[in-house]
Image (tube, helix red, strand yellow):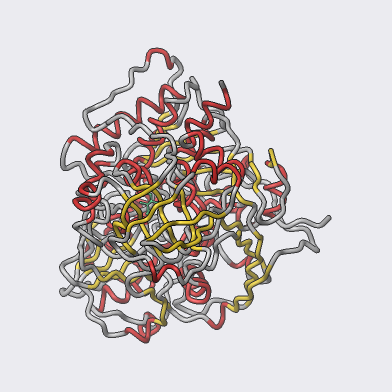
Amino acid sequence: MAKNIAQKIIEAHLVEGKTVPGQEIALKIDQTLLQDATGTMAMLEFETLDVPRVKVKRATAYVDHNMLQTGFENADDHLFLQTMAAKYGLYYSRPGNGISHQAHLERFDIPGQTMLGADSHTCQAGALGMIAIGAGGCEVALAMAGEPYSLIMPEIHLVSLKGTLPAWCSAKDIILELLRRLTVKGGLGKIFEFGGPSLAKLTVPQRSTIANMGAELGLTTSVFPADERTQNFLKAQNRLKDFKFLLPDKDAKYDGQIELDLSKLEPLIAKPHNPDNVVPVREVEGTEVRQVAVGSSVNSSFVDLMVIAEVLKNKKINPGLQLTISPGSRQVLVMVTQNGALSEMIKAGARGLEVACGPCIGMGMAPPSGGISVRTFNRNFPGRSGTADDQVYLTSPEVAAATALKGVITDPRKLGKPPRIKMPTKFYIDDTHFLPPAKDPDKVEIVRGPNIQPLPIQEPLREILEGEVIIKLKDNISTDEILPAGAKILPLRSNIPGISEFMFFYLDPGFVKRVKEKQGGFIVAGENYGQGSSREHAAIVPMYLGIQAVIAKSYARIHRGNLINFGILPFEFANSKDYEMLQQGEKIVLRNVPGIVKSKDRILAEVNGNRIELKINLTERNREIVLAGGLLNYIKSKKS
Ligand code: MIC
């Protein structure tokens, strides 16, 4: 039977189940990816599994998020990760070496392989023909221990590209257009496979921009073919040995198809506070801007930075704003240094930041109060930048450069001829800052500074769940709202008691006090609860604070998995109108919970003398995980 690319990779890695959309499958994982903000927790989880050495083809731990060292915390985390990596068989990418997804694309992504990463943007590796999926750290720890990864088989949709991108439009406009059309929920339960007559025109960095923001669509992942473009990229990275063609069969079938005529696109921008709030740039042109920030995994490639440098060459940025540049990797930074582009940007007035995620997760460069920040990044959830009343817009490097020059949001088509950046035929290569695992692991001592706190203990599932609704939330609440990032909070990622003080910090500063006074309770939410990051802290912290369950209209994929893995049941309203009935302070009682979780799909919640029906919607494996007291306990009980 003719197969598409996603089917080919999935079938070659299938360990359990049938590739029927909606059914549970398990995949063999070839590579794992950790980053420091989720990786310390994943490493603590891995440690409990008693596995002496990782069992995947390649495991890598990056330091790219927690880079501002304003106290001992982040430095403690780096050392912990470095020594854990050396002992257990991971490559350790030193701080300054690269944003994980960009550096991995350059050096380690391999067409046809699978990867599981403790970061939602792991899907960026789909640009090189991988099935790469973001997941909670616990799932990645298990994959490192050689366990297959269980997921619901997604539908596979073809995104067919035709036409040619107009001048001043780029890959960011393609993904923003998909977000505009489909919204942040549009990709739930799906893989997007890119194809069509214009696919061959897209370079690997362009593909990686598109694949990266599949996370914002809610996709399980995206995948591109491995074609001549891929071959040229890997050749220029001196990695031809990793290349093989991976194309869909001629009559491959898909579960759905989206047509995108590139020639109809125009420069786009996502307004605050959701990546799907997309409008043409011309609609917001002239809006005064205080900050322009270039970088983040989605737009920090050599080509992205060259666009900025070319536009700014021999010019000065507007005095009303600040411009920051964060290169995606050491490779990118060295190349823009050697060819003089960095000095063009600096001369124009840019502030050069280090190779890191930086402002994208609020690690520095928080914008001024209420001030508009135009960013080439992938997320603009409220407060993520570190400023409570931030106003973050997401756009392409082209729009960012034009805006930096003019001081107001600017349609770059006004600037005349667009820059023409050539893809390098040879990249700068130096792998010495990926430290390989130790040859003598027994001699490696794990350095555990005071920021590394033990994992909290998970209680078994209770017979009766009862308590008040502690908070009632609207649709599309992101993990950035549940448990914010930012320079003050991120350093506590290895310290659950410490970070628990910040749950719903910007959204509802009284939440933590209330949940403690009430000794736990329920969270009620609308659609797509927990969109955004893979941070399992957004599930561990509620568990730690005594949250009994979440009741929502629907959930984002990764966060739902994280809740289950930490024993918090993700209930759904059987009748979404009941959402209106549940108000903050309302008392809820659920009885015989383990009995119902064992075999039923519905449960009745007692609310103020009324009963409302909730859906449970769990796979067999999910049920066993919840009953075993979480994923780690489940795996251990299976082994004993
Ligand atoms: C993000 O972009 O939101 C992050 C920060 O990279 C997260 C990971 C995290 O919370 O540490 C992600 O995308 O998963």
Which residue is most to the front? 609
In the rendered image, is residue 181 in sight?
yes
Is 517 rendered above or below residue 554? above
Quadrant of the rendering where the C terminus is positioned? top right
Is 78 rendered above or below residue 623? above
Taking the spot 29% from the left edge, 69% from the top edge, the residue there is: 392
Quarter of the image for residue 292 reads bottom left
Q: Is residue 459 left or right of residue 238?
A: left
Is 137 rendered above or below residue 606? above
Front position in the image: 418 or 216: 216
Q: Is residue 168 left or right of residue 376?
A: right
Q: Is residue 244 left or right of residue 66?
A: right
Taking the spot 44% from the left edge, 38% from the top edge, the residue there is: 461
In the rendered image, is residue 102 in sight?
no
Q: Residue 564, position in %: x, y?
A: 47, 45
Which residue is most to the right? 1
Quadrant of the rendering where the N terminus is positioned? bottom right
Q: Residue 556, position in %: x, y?
A: 47, 58
Quarter of the image for residue 413 reads bottom left
Taking the spot 23% from the left edge, 75% from the top edge, the residue there is: 289
Q: Is residue 210 left or right of residue 339?
A: right
Q: Residue 342, position in %: x, y?
A: 30, 58
Is 443 rendered above or below residue 187? above
